Amino acid sequence: MSTMNYVPEPKPQFGPIEVTALYYPGTEQMAEWDQVEQTLPHIKPLLGWYDEGNPEVVDWQIKWAVEHGISNFCVDWYWNKGVQRLDHWVKAYYKARYRKYLKWFMMYANHNEVRAHSTQDQINVTKFWIDNYFKTPEYYTIDGHPVVVYWASHNLDDDFIREAADHGEVLKPGEGIRRAFAISNQLMKEAGLPEIYFIEMFHYVKEEVKQRLQWAKDIGCQAAMMYNFDLVAYQIAPEAAKMEDVETHLHYDCVVEASRKWWPQSSLGSPVPFWPLLPTGWNDKPRSFQYARMVYGRTPEKFLQMCKNLRDFCDKHSLRHIVVAPLNEWQEGSYIEPNQEFGFQMYDALRDVFCDKPAEGFPPNLVPSDVGLGPYDYPPMPHLAKTSWDFSSDTQGWYRNPYGTAYLKNVDGALHFFRNGVKVPSLRTRIAPFDAANFTKLRLRMKINPSPKFPVTGNYPDHGKTTLSLLWGGEGNPLILPNNSITIENIASTEVLPDGEWHEYTIDLAANPRWKGSIDELWLDTPRLFLAYFDIAWMRLE
């Protein structure tokens, strides 16, 4: 295969410890990168504000990963009753030239609404896996068994218990998910494939660790892993925190020390193998602004030390599989993929500790410009000259906030999306500047279908609020300030009804004296109702 005018062929570098990296395919358009560019521009990837759906971009990611010891990606994968999203990276991966060098498997991000899981849905999703992934040589297996990680096993278990109750059957906790796994494995058998190797995803440490790991074994999982560690470091090693630290603002030294304490707590004596986690930081300003949680003080030198600590731990206890988590969650500040802030230093730390150095030395760290390729940036986010939206087609310049909104699309001539309740605005648009003096109100027609499980409460602040707000910014009156917070004074609101019916609402903009000057950015903050669906038929400034 010729590589003339293309990404140079990878030269894999591995060692005795297998390295899995969690991969979040969260940038399907420039709108997602735009929030990073506005708040943390210095972390820009060396691939640029890149198009994750470009197979050539994926080939660079494959090359860099395998040349620094990463042999497989565990990729966030979304399915909600047959509706997929953020699958652009996997599609591009299967078109990439160098996919044979890097395996992948899914972390089924099943944080869906109540009753999204069912017997029929389990049949449908398993058949999809079999038809599209499990028969491909690139899909990661353990002893021949395709690997599937479940983000929220309790969601699957609860829905199968509800389905059984609908038919007069009582299932105990854990029996629902075992039934779901049995359905999948029966279909695997019928397809002539080995059973699935299921992995439980661990999130918190407030609960009894061994109890949660016993749950993983009891429901039929063969292993367990963790998505991110930084935000729970304070619970594990509060003595390592700085005097000014709190759980939401933490020095990286605490993460390094907490990791060293957490590995033996979770990975030694576990009922199922628990793959030790190598955390990669946290700073979710691009998504959360003034509500952000962050780990500060991260450096390549401290990351290198944590790598050495983990290597020593694995060697001492004969552990041979670790997880880097995550590799590229840019909007949450969890990343080590090569970038302008650190270059290749984080990747080099991983390689230098976990790879066997060849006699000729490691391959050089090439970037696209070294071979006359790139850039791979998305086109800039468009700033449409619009002050009214009929949603007769597409989303007409409105984009989701990745932290609080999902499944944003046009459905039957309405803007349709899913809200998870997080305390951040749900939709945004950047527009050609207009004079605020020309408009006094925002009118829209909207329908809200709340979750039957969480009609007014949830796990985050303000979940039960029924307030609809518009936030704005412009020249001389910015929405996003230099300290990466939102000017919450630039806001106007009204109350709405989450009753599943269509209603028209009016937000009085002129009532706020800050509605003035040139406006070039709007954010719509819908009620923070956990797992609620929203539809907007039209919206206009008047």
Image: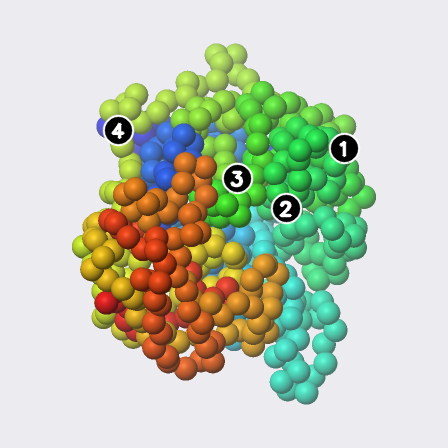
For badge 1, the amino acid type reads Glu
Q: Residue furthest left?
A: 385
For badge 2, the amino acid type reads Met
In space, the residues marked 1 and 3 are separated at their CA atoms by 22 Å
- Quadrant into which the C terminus falls: bottom left
Q: What element carries label 2?
A: strand
Q: Is mark 4 on a helix, strand or loop?
A: loop
Q: Which residue is drawn at 52% across and 33% down?
A: 70
Q: Residue at x 73, y 69 (%)?
A: 173
Q: Which residue lies furthest to the top in this view?
A: 360
Where residue 260 sits: x, y (%)? Answer: 72, 32
In space, the residues marked 4 and 2 are separated at their CA atoms by 36 Å
Q: Nearer the viewer, mark 1 or mark 2?
A: 1
In space, the residues marked 3 and 2 are separated at their CA atoms by 18 Å
Q: Which mark is residue 283?
A: 3
Q: Name the residue under label 2.
A: 226
In space, the residues marked 1 and 2 are separated at their CA atoms by 23 Å
Q: Is residue 31 left or right of residue 304?
A: left
Q: Nearer the viewer, mark 4 or mark 2?
A: 2
**Mark 1–mark 4 CB contact (< 8 Å):** no
N-terminal-most mark, 1 or 4: 1
Q: Is residue 351 above or below residue 289?
A: above
Q: Is residue 455 left or right of residue 308?
A: left
Q: Is residue 419 above or below residue 449?
A: above
Q: Residue furthest right?
A: 269
Q: Is residue 166 left or right of residue 393?
A: right
Q: How crowded is mark 2: few (under 14 residues within 10 Å), some or many (20 or more)?
A: many
Q: Is residue 210 or residue 119 the one in the foreground?
A: 210
Q: Which mark is residue 239?
A: 1
Q: What element carries label 3?
A: loop
N-terminal-most mark, 1 or 2: 2
